[in-house]
Image (spheres, grey):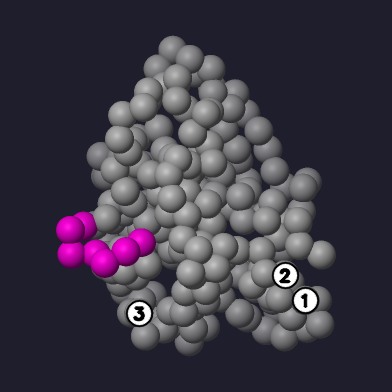
């Protein structure tokens, strides 16, 4: 790993919330969508924000959803989903979902922190779990849910030139969405917003 990559690694470790300081509701974006969803309880969910250490630097692992899903068809996502009764916590849920969706077992994943809770327009309260993934992993995606698995350099998302904001109408109301157009794929919506949360935390660490 280069000196720059090692420095970024250290900043990342300092930027996230510690494992002994898990986030809770409301989400950091609660005020932005309260007028759309009200104060109804959000369903707890968790995603894994997978960081892979490559020789060229740190990358972020993503999935692209299949086109036949009822929700988020074709979108770029982190592995994750709603918490189940048997999940001990958000980490357990994120690890389970990653195994089910991508085929990467918990033995290859080392959680090291959290991002702040994020609320979605679909009614979820999402806890992002940030983790290192062993670079020797072999993805075995569930073809019913995941069309592709890919990595993108973390440095790409840290470049302000790669961030876009766009206004759309959702249920008759204007909303601003975030886009990170990575070559060949457009990362937007909740995934882009959680990435932006990570970027802002890293930027705040000297």
Say which residue appears at 31% left-offset and 48% top-offset: 44
Q: Label 1 crowding class (10 Å Cα cut-off): few <14, some 14-19, many 20+?
A: few
Work out how far the residue at label 2 is from the one at label 1, CA to CA, in angstroms: 6 Å
Q: Identify residue for label 3.
A: 106
Secondary structure category for the residue under label 1 = helix
Q: Is residue 85 magenta?
A: yes
The magenta span reads 84-90
| Most common SS among magenta residues | loop
Q: Identify residue for label 1.
A: 7
**Image side of residue 156 versus residue 82, left or right:** right
Residue 191 lies, in percent from the top left, at: 50, 48
Could you tell me how many numbered marks the image carries?
Answer: 3
Secondary structure category for the residue under label 3 = helix
Q: Label 2 crowding class (10 Å Cα cut-off): few <14, some 14-19, many 20+?
A: some
Say which residue appears at 45% left-offset and 20% top-offset: 35
**Image side of residue 27 versus residue 1, left or right:** left
Residue 177 lies, in percent from the top left, at: 57, 32
Say which residue appears at 47% left-offset and 74% top-offset: 111
Nearest to the observer: residue 175 or residue 26: 26
Nearest to the observer: residue 77 or residue 6: 6
Q: Are marks 2 and 1 in contact (CB under 8 Å)?
A: yes
Going from the N terminus, do you reach mark 1 or mark 3 first? 1
Q: Identify residue for label 2.
A: 11
Say which residue appears at 56% left-offset and 76% top-offset: 52
Residue 10 lies, in percent from the top left, at: 71, 76
**Image side of residue 125 versus residue 113, left or right:** left
């Amino acid at each position: 790993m280069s000196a720059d990559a090692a420095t970024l690694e250290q900043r990342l470790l300092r930027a996230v919330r510690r494992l002994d300081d898990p986030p809770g509701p409301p989400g950091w974006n609660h005020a932005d969508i309260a007028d759309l969803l009200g104060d109804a309880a959000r369903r707890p969910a968790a995603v894994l924000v997978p960081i892979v250490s490559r020789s060229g630097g740190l990358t972020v692992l993503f999935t692209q959803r299949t086109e036949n899903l009822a929700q988020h068809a074709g979108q770029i996502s982190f592995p994750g989903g709603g918490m189940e009764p048997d999940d001990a916590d958000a980490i357990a849920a994120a690890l389970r979902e990653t195994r089910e969706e991508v085929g990467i077992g918990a033995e290859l994943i080392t959680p090291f922190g959290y991002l702040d809770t994020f609320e979605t327009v679909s009614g979820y309260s999402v806890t992002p779990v940030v983790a290192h993934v062993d670079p020797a992993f072999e993805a075995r995606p569930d073809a019913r849910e995941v069309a592709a698995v890919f990595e993108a350099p973390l440095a790409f998302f840290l470049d302000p030139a790669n961030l876009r904001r766009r206004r759309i109408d959702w249920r008759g109301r204007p909303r601003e969405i975030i886009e990170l157009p990575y070559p060949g794929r457009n990362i937007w919506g909740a995934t882009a917003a959680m990435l932006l949360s990570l970027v802002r935390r890293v930027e705040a660490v000297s």
